[in-house]
Image (spheres, rainbow, N blue to C red):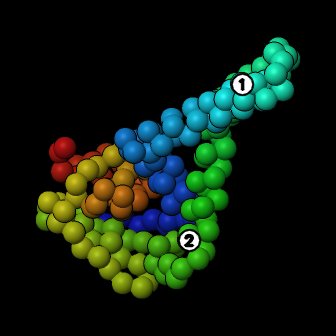
């Protein structure tokens, strides 16, 4: 089966966001960063109250409010940060072949991905994990690397027939 598709910068950004949200390390990192801000805010309020030698409840209220805001909105900030960093990484190096038209061929042995700069082949044994989401299928060939297959314009029933059962 031959599949024609175009990969965009947004496809790579969405892959990175998806990967971070699904990986144990990414989840743990987000939780730690989400909790450490409020701990610092509340610790600072206690230190400031101790240093000033008074217990002003409004001070605890301000730091408490800042802690709640941090905890609630940090995931949004984190997502924006990942988007920005991914764009920078894509722009930073020569990434010919990443973005643009691709042709993927699926057969009983594996897959072949072609673009104007070359081609890669991998057997089905080299595909470690297949993750299907609403708009994409990710064919992981390593723990942090995957072939990104956008679903837009594809006959996904036909594609699923060629993918190995996992």
Residue 95: x %, y % from top left: 50, 78
> What residue lies at 29% left-to-right and 76% top-to-bottom?
120
Instruction: Name the element at disc 1.
Output: helix
Residue 67 found in image quarter: top right
On residue 152, the disc is: none
Could you say which quadrant of the image residue 93 lies in?
Answer: bottom right
Above/below status of 44 relative to 16: above
Q: Name the residue under label 2.
A: 90
Q: To which residue does mark 1 refer? A: 46
Residue situated in front as seen by the camera: 162 or 9? 9
Of tags 1 and 2, the one toward the viewer is 1
What SS does tag 2 mark? Answer: helix
**Residue 165 appears in the figure:** yes
- Provide residue 154's location: percent of width, then percent of height: 42, 54
Instruction: Name the residue located 57 percent from the left edge and 62 percent from the top edge.
Output: 86
Q: Is residue 154 above or below residue 39?
A: below
Give the mark, 1 or 2, whose residue is nearer the N terminus: 1
Q: How crowded is mark 1: few (under 14 residues within 10 Å), some or many (20 or more)?
A: some
Quadrant assignment for the N terminus? bottom left
| Residue 60 falls left or right of residue 96 | right
Left or right for 63, reference 74: right
Q: Can residue 63 be seen in this view?
A: no
How dense is the environment of label 2, judged by Cα within 10 Å: few (below 14), some, or many (20 and up)? some
The image quarter containing residue 76 is top right
Image location (x, y in percent) of residue 115: 41, 78
User: Seen in the image, is 71 located left or right of residue 47?
Assistant: left
Quarter of the image with the C terminus is: top left
Q: Which residue is drawn at 61% across and 55% down?
A: 83
């Amino acid at each position: 089966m031959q599949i024609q598709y175009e990969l965009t910068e947004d496809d790579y950004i969405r892959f990175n966001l998806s990967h971070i949200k699904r990986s144990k390390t990414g989840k743990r990192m987000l939780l730690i960063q989400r909790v450490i801000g409020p701990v610092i805010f509340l610790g600072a309020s206690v230190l400031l109250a101790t240093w000033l030698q008074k217990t002003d409840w409004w001070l605890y209220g301000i730091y408490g409010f800042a802690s709640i805001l941090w905890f609630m909105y940090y995931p949004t900030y984190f997502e924006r940060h990942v988007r920005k960093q991914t764009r920078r990484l894509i722009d930073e190096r020569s990434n010919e072949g990443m973005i643009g038209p691709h042709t993927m061929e699926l057969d009983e042995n594996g897959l072949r991905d072609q673009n104007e700069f070359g081609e890669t082949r991998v057997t089905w044994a080299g595909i470690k994990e297949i993750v299907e989401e609403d708009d994409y299928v990710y064919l992981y060939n390593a723990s942090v690397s995957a072939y990104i297959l956008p679903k837009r314009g594809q006959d996904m029933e036909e594609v699923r027939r060629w993918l190995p059962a996992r």
